[in-house]
Amino acid sequence: MSRDIQLKERWEKVVAFLSDKFADGEVLDLDAIIYLIGVQELGKINIEFKKDEKVNLMHIAICKLLEPYGYYEFEFFDKDGWPHYKVIKELPALKAGEQSVLMKEAIVNYFLEKEIIE
């Protein structure tokens, strides 16, 4: 099976799993999935987040997702329990479609590592 087909199938599993669990079957988009990963990584659920906190949650998720690729490294948790990452190397200039593929691949790998999908 080609890498692209495998990624597509695994991505669909992630979307189906999260959509069923968090959106009553309504299909979640990439940004919503990144947000959910940020909430998971923060570890504080059932909290109403402010707009700037939602942006920070997405940043946490992106850092966590791209850490295995060598772009970020976990530094510390602040006094409020929020994780902080440092930039190890700058992200390459990617077109929108390439960014999307990178993030989907990183999300699939995250869910494989957590053994939520196969």
Image: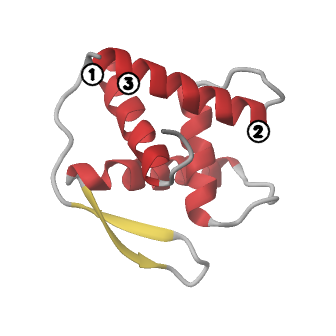
Q: The disc labelled 3 sits on which kind of residue?
A: Leu
Q: Residue at x 56, y 46 (%)?
A: 116
Figure quadrant of the N terminus: top left
For the residues labelled 1 and 3, the Cα–Cα distance comes to 6 Å
Q: Please give left or right for residue 88 compared with residue 114 in the image.
A: left
The image position of residue 65, as x and y in percent, is: 39, 49
**Residue furthest to the bottom:** 79
Q: Amino acid at mark 2?
A: Lys
The picture places residue 25, in percent across and down from the top left corner, at: 79, 24
Where does residue 39 sit, x and y in percent of width and height? 63, 55
Mark 2 surroundings within 10 Å by alpha-carbon count, few (fewer than 14), some (14 through 19), many (20 or more): few
Q: State which tag comes first along the sequence, 1 or 2.
A: 1
Crowdedness near tag 3: few (<14), some (14–19) or many (≥20) residues, C-alpha within 10 Å:
some
Q: Are marks 1 and 3 in contact (CB under 8 Å)?
A: yes
Residue at the disc numbered 2: 21
Q: Is residue 73 above or below residue 111?
A: below
Quick one: SS at disc 1?
helix
